Amino acid sequence: MDWEKATRIAHAIGSSRLLTVKMALFRKASDYARMRVDWQLSTPEERVLMDAARTKAHDAFIEACEMMSRCMEDEKEDISWREDLGNDRKEIGDLACYLHLILGLVAR
């Protein structure tokens, strides 16, 4: 995933009126992005111990994306971002990292 695609998807999600669902997605993105960094900084032994939790966080973020898409569709909001995102787990995980970055920059 590149920056342009990530910001396009982030803008589409951020434009939703569904505040509660959107905040849940952003929290799940941040949780998973933190785990990805922890994974990168860990030893092979530490990675074995954290693997199940990392997968669980990734699955939770993917489910949050699905929930956001369903709720936006119910509200007749544009969900073309979900098709643009696709179903590749690595790409979806990349989106979590981009969202984490964007949220951090917006918070300054």
Image: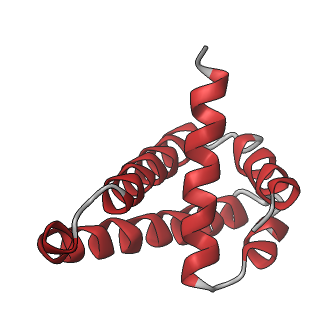
Q: Residue at x 88, y 55 (%)?
A: 4
Count up the numbered dots. Answer: 0
Q: Position of 82 compared to 58: left or right?
A: right
Q: Is residue 70 left or right of residue 45?
A: right
**Looking at the figure, which quarter contains the C terminus?**
top right
Residue shown at the point (20%, 77%) measured from the top left: 52
Q: Position of residue 101 (x, y in %)?
A: 61, 40
Q: Quadrant of residue 79?
A: bottom right
How is the rendered protein coloured? Answer: secondary structure
Q: What residue lies at 68% left-to-right and 59% top-to-bottom? A: 72
- Residue 74 lies, in percent from the top left, at 67, 64
Quarter of the picture holding the N terminus? bottom right
Task: Give left or right: position of 64 versus 76.
Answer: left
Residue 16 falls in image quadrant: top right
Q: Residue furthest front?
A: 43
5 left or right of 54 in image = right
Q: Is residue 70 above or below residue 34?
A: below
- The residue most toward the top is 108
* Residue plotted at (40% across, 57% down): 32
| Residue toward you, 91 or 59 | 91
Please tell me whether residue 64 is drawn above or below residue 101 in the rendered image: below
The percent position of residue 33, horizontal first and vertical second, equals 45, 53
Q: Is residue 88 above or below residue 45?
A: below
